Structure formats: C-alpha cells, structure tokens
Image (cartoon, rainbow, N blue to C red):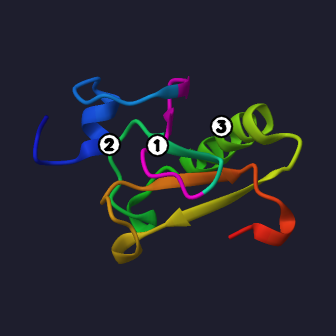
Amino acid sequence: MSDACIFCDIVAKKAPAEVVHENDDVLVIRNVEPQAPVHLLVIPKSHHPNLDSLSDETLLVRMISAAKQVGDEHSAEKGYRLGINSAKQADIGHIHLHVLGGLDKETAL
C-alpha cells in the first residue's frame, strides 16, 4: 500500500475492501468502522481531496445516484441517510459519501 491515499489504493485494488458496488465512476465499500448497521462509503475512482476540488460537478450527482442504489438495496426497509465530509472534517483526504442505514428513527445518528 502507498502512503498517499488509502481510497486510491482501494480503487487500484492495492488495498483490501469489501466492495458492494462498482461502476465506471465510483466504488462502494463497507466501512471497516461502521456507525450504523449499514454503513457504506461511495468513493469516486478519481482522487479529489474535497468538494472544492470537484471540477466535474456531475461526479457528485453520480455519487449520489450510486448511494441511492446501494441504499435501496441494503436498507430499503428502514431507509438510509447520506453524509459527506469535506476537508478537515474527513479522516481521509479523498472525498467520499457515507450511506448510513438500518437504524430506527429513534436511534438514528
């Protein structure tokens, strides 16, 4: 694995991850430190450290589309939430979208 970016290593298949969905633009994996019964990460295959670095604004739309698809597949009964961290709010400097599902409304984050 490189020291650069763990998500880039996962996309390049240089680091292990449980992949639940993949298309030309994004890779969706299970979070190794889940904060909900369903906790998936939608990762763009191209490296973008934060929202401001997205020159292709439609990439965010494609990320949300993939999140909707996996959210519906993995947490349709109870629904799901989407969350995105940017810049210093994220532990990893590669933009990604959290899909959190399987929570009861009363216990949701």
| 42 to 87, vertically: above or below | above
Which residue does the numbered mark 3 point to in the structure image? Answer: 66
Q: Which residue does the image show at 15% across and 48% down from the upper left?
A: 4
Q: Which residue does the image show at 49% across and 49% down from the upper left?
A: 56
Magenta region includes residue 28: yes
Which residue does the numbered mark 1 point to in the structure image? Answer: 43
Quadrant in which the N terminus is drawn: top left
Asked if marks 3 and 1 touch (Cβ < 8 Å), the reply is: no
| 34 to 44, vertically: above or below | below
Outermost residue, bottom direction? 88
Q: For this view, does 79 lie left or right of residue 40?
A: right
Disc nearer the start of the sequence (2/1): 2
Q: Nearer the viewer, residue 77 or 87?
A: 77
Magenta residues (range)? 20-35
Q: Secondary structure at mark 3?
A: helix
Q: Position of residue 3 (x, y in %)?
A: 10, 47
Q: Position of residue 64 (x, y in %)?
A: 66, 47
Which residue does the numbered mark 2 point to in the structure image? Answer: 7
| 11 to 84, vertically: above or below | above
Residue 12: quadrant of the picture: top left
Q: CA distance from mark 3 to mark 1?
A: 10 Å
Q: Secondary structure at mark 1?
A: strand
Q: Which residue does the image show at 76% across and 68% down from the upper left?
A: 107
Disc nearer the start of the sequence (3/2): 2
Residue flagged by tag 3: what amino acid is it?
Answer: Ala
